[in-house]
Image (cartoon, grey):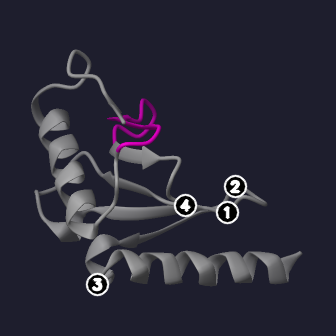
């Protein structure tokens, strides 16, 4: 996992650390290839790992709470992005069930 302490500072770094905390509480392993950074277009701080079919992110204006963390799934067929608040999931397994449902719907469309 790549976290550039030279690039991230202040509020973005605080959110990045919070995202790592939330990922760890979910039981995510962050030792694979991934990145924690700020999206230059949206300004959102995100945590992405190639080991997971989703990305965690926090918007610019937010509080450090689970309700302000978003789970983002990107449809591999059409690039559509679908998101849910992390607070809507009880566990990592629940996120996987959500992703599987979205992927099943994706397959039905094609």
Q: Is residue 96 left or right of residue 67?
A: right
Per the image, label 4 sits on a secondary structure element best described as loop
**Outermost residue, top side:** 6
Q: Is residue 38 left or right of residue 67?
A: right
- Circle 2 crowding by C-alpha within 10 Å: few under 14, some 14–19, many from 20: few
- Circle 3 crowding by C-alpha within 10 Å: few under 14, some 14–19, many from 20: few
- Dominant SS of magenta comes to loop
Which residues are drawn in magenta? Answer: 31-44
What residue is pinned by disc 1? 75
Per the image, label 2 sits on a secondary structure element best described as loop
Estimate the spatial distance between the alpha carbons at disc 2 and disc 3, rounded to whole Å.
26 Å
> In the rendered structure, are the residues bearing label 4 and label 2 in contact, judged by CB atoms less than 8 Å apart?
no
**Outermost residue, right side:** 110
What residue is pinned by disc 4? 53
Above/below status of 13 relative to 105: above
What residue is pinned by disc 3? 90
Mark before the other along the chain sequence, 4 or 3: 4
């Amino acid at each position: 996992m790549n976290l550039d302490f030279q690039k991230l500072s202040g509020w973005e770094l605080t959110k990045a650390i919070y995202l790592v905390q939330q990922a760890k509480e979910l039981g995510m392993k962050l030792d694979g290839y991934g990145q924690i950074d700020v999206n230059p277009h949206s300004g959102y701080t995100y945590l992405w790992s190639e080991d997971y079919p989703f990305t965690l992110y926090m918007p610019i204006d937010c509080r450090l709470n689970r309700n302000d963390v978003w789970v983002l799934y990107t449809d591999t067929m059409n690039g559509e992005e679908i998101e849910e608040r992390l607070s809507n999931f009880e566990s990592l397994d629940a996120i996987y069930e959500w992703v599987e449902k979205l992927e099943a719907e994706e397959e039905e469309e094609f």
